[in-house]
Amino acid sequence: MASTVPQEELPILEAVINIRNRLTALKKNRAEYVKASDVNSLYQSVVKQVNKLNDVRDDTTTYNNRLDTTLADVFSLLSLFYLTIGKTKDTLGTYCQIASMKQILNHMNESAVYNDADLAPFHRRLNELRNIIQHDKEHGKHPKPLIKLLERQLNECEAIVRTLQESLSVLPVELVPVHQKLVTIRRQLVALAAKEGSHKAELKPLQEELRKIESARVDGNFLGPGGIVPTSQALCSSLLEECFEISQEIKANEESKHVASSLKPIYDRLSGLRTELESLVLTHRWTLRETDLFNYSLSLQEIDKMRVDGKFVDSEGNRPPGQYVLLYMLRRCYGLIYRLLSSSEPVSEELMPIANKLSTVKKCLNEVLKYGGPFSARDLYPYQLALFQIDSMRQDGKFIGVDGTIPEGQGILMAHLNECHELVEMLRESMEEADDDDEEDIEDDEDYDEDDESDEGPAEEKH
């Protein structure tokens, strides 16, 4: 529970709330692109307040009051703004990614449904984020308190990953295939539980797989080669029992459709969030402003906090059926947010329309090159015109923002642009080669005709 804000911290809280309001207003303004200068100005204001806060606090005490939660909101928003302006390789841009990753890892730890393949991408991504933070630390790009905050959050995530890896390390080699199979089946079952309609046809093969795994046990134990009983049976046994439990719940809920009526508002809310996030995954290159994800994160956190001992309860404190469905949808939404954050490109929002246009032109040119001709100069004209229009947007070789600044993503855009020009040149060369081949064929035909005429001449004379 949050503690009361001390008197000496109240002016700082007031200033931080003001900054959060300004960030929220900037987030809602869709009339113009986010300017890096506006974001940097707000960031400097936050740094100023953090320095003041450090002066009135000591390093040994853990604080948790309204000022801390408001600061967390401010850093989350700032981090998303950094992604929006293309600064994905900046320490502040890692803040929201680490927070999202921590939520997913906590849920994985709670569910105990994961394998080494699931943990490997998190381990790699954490190493990448640590390198970003370490680089900025060595070059003094950010104040030490911010670096310390990010390093602490990163360490917490790495600690969770180590805990998860250690829990798998006790699994004997003989049981690894069984465990991986059960993890896959469980995921298929909870995904099935969240789907609309009847599930009998899809449920039957999964139940048969479970019975097959169950029948392989002897006296409740999984056996290894030679009939030995490997240690650490509990991990696989509990997972198998949970899979049977979910399959039974799916069958029982066929008539009642997914969840109890008392949990229906939560289900509807999660269903709406999931639909919107899945739509963003498909269209994010064209429609997503990373700061939009802040509201989704807040909504999911509110729903997550409704749980009591990991379960959703009704007004009487009971745990109605449909828990697996709600948890699956909650974790699915967390995963979609993390996916969107991870796929954020180091290109400013202002340059994304150009980046998307270049990406489309490049795909089209690759397709033309792949399937070949015959084609004419007229066929290449639309691509050359599009590239000419993009080229004409540059000033002194740079794409300039509306405020005269140079937005992030210049290198990526230039690489795409040069690649497009190279593809056009390759197509022109192949077109010229085709023309040369046609001319040679015509010359060969003319020579052949002359040879025919010379052969016919003497024959006519003899006749």
Image (cartoon, helix red, strand yellow):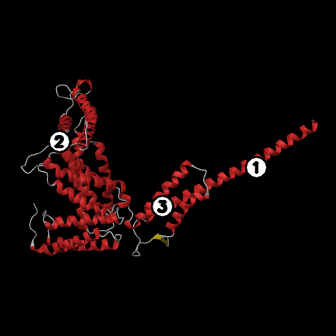
Q: Which residue is mark 2?
A: 256
Give the residue drawn at x 53%, y 66%.
388
Q: Which residue is mark 1?
A: 443
For discs 3 and 2, the disc positioned in front in the rendered view? 2
User: Dot 1: what SS?
Assistant: helix
Residue 131 quadrant: bottom left
Residue 158 visible here: no
Q: Disc 1 and disc 3: Cα gap in Å? A: 42 Å
Q: Quadrant of the C terminus?
A: top right
Where residue 438 sits in the image (x, y, percent)?
Answer: 69, 50
Q: Are marks 2 and 1 in contact (CB under 8 Å)?
A: no
Q: Is residue 463 shown left or right of residue 133?
A: right
| Residue neighbourhood size for the residue with mark 2, other residues' Cα within 10 Å, grouped as few (<14), some (14–19), many (≥20) | few
Amino acid residing under circle 1: Glu
| Residue neighbourhood size for the residue with mark 3, other residues' Cα within 10 Å, grouped as few (<14), some (14–19), many (≥20) | few
**Looking at the image, which is closer to me, 155 or 8?**
8
- Which mark, by number, is residue 415? 3
Q: Is residue 189 shown left or right of residue 317?
A: right
Q: Disc 3 and disc 2: Cα gap in Å? A: 55 Å
Where residue 306 sits in the image (x, y, percent)?
Answer: 14, 54
